[in-house]
Each structure stands twice: as structure tokens, then as C-alpha cells.
Amino acid sequence: MRSWRAGRQCIRRRCHSTCLSEPVKLYSVEEAQAALPEIIPVLEGISAAYVELRALQASLSAEVRGASGDGHLLANPWQEGGKNRVEELNRELRRGAAELDRRGVELKDPEKGLSDFFHDRHGRIVFLCFQLGEARIQYWHELRAGFAGRQPLWVT
């Protein structure tokens, strides 16, 4: 794994644009693929925690209104340990994000388990893109292109 200093180039990191001056890890396709057995469980944990947290927040929102969509009263999730569970889920999300960050992997969508690896493609820094449910790393995209700009790796 090589590193690359971003210099003046601005790179989108963690939901905001920032100019990086610290080196970032560059993955070859093979290195990124080899990292997946360790990355996938982290992404699965993040996704599960995120989905559960959203459900808890939705139930709290409905509880504050006094009823679910079908008119039945809901138990207060905060009275049933919901607040502690929210804190646990937030810790799980932070822990997972920190693990990905430590490995130089960018988390793009916590619910879908969408992540990117910095990669040198023919002299240009791009992202190798992976999403939970995919068998392997098959796509890349420009740093600012996002998921919609994904292109198959085998196309030059």
C-alpha cells in the first residue's frame, strides 16, 4: 500500500469537502480486494447499527406524536432502555467509522455499506468502490463523481 499526499487537491471526506495535507493510503485493486474480509464485517456492523438507530429514532418520533401510523399507542422507547441503546448504537457507528478511517477506507453510505478506497489509476487518484452485497471490488470512480459515476474496472 502506497501513500499519496493530496497537496492542494480537495477531496470529499466524511460528508464535507476538505483539503488534505496528510498522506492517504493508496490501494491496488488486489490490496483492496484482500482487505475485504476484514472490512465487510465492519461495514455490516455499521449498517446494522445505522438501520436500528434510524428505527429507534422513528419510533421515538411516532411516540412523541402519541401513536403509530395505525393509531395504536406506542411504548416510550426512552423508558425501555432506548436512550442507552441509542448511545450504544452511536458508539458502534463511531467505532466502525474509526476502524475504516484507520485503514484509509472512506465510508460513503452507512446504511448500504458503501465505501471507497483511494487508488492510483493510470497516474490519477480515484476511488475503488465497494458496496455490501457485491462479491468483489468491481468499480472505480473519480473522487468527486460518487456512486453515479461508477465505472467497471475492466474498462480503461
Image: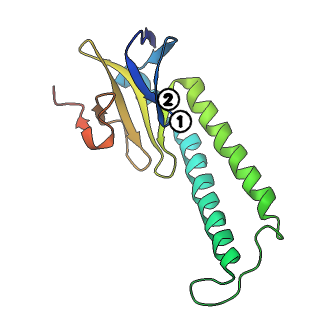
Which residue occupies the foreground of this view, 136 or 91?
91
Residue 134 percent across, percent down from the top left: 38, 46
Task: For mark 1, give the secondary structure.
Answer: helix
Residue found farthest to the bottom:
71
Task: For mark 2, give the secondary structure.
Answer: strand
Tag shown at residue 105: 2
> Amino acid type of disc 1?
Ile
How far apart are the alpha carbons under marks 2 and 1? 9 Å
Q: Are marks 2 and 1 in contact (CB under 8 Å)?
A: yes
Query: What residue is rendered at 66% in x and 89% in y?
Result: 72
Query: What residue is rendered at 35% in x and 30% in y?
Result: 128
Label 1 packing within 10 angstroms: few (<14), some (14-19), many (20+): many
Q: In the rendered image of this protein, does residue 50 appear above or below residue 116?
A: below
- When asked about the image quadrant of residue 127, the answer is top left
- When asked about the image quadrant of residue 95, the answer is top right
> Amino acid type of disc 2?
Val
Which residue occupies the foreground of this view, 108 or 122?
108
Q: In the rendered image of this protein, does residue 91 appear above or below residue 16?
A: below
Instruction: Identify residue for label 1.
Output: 39
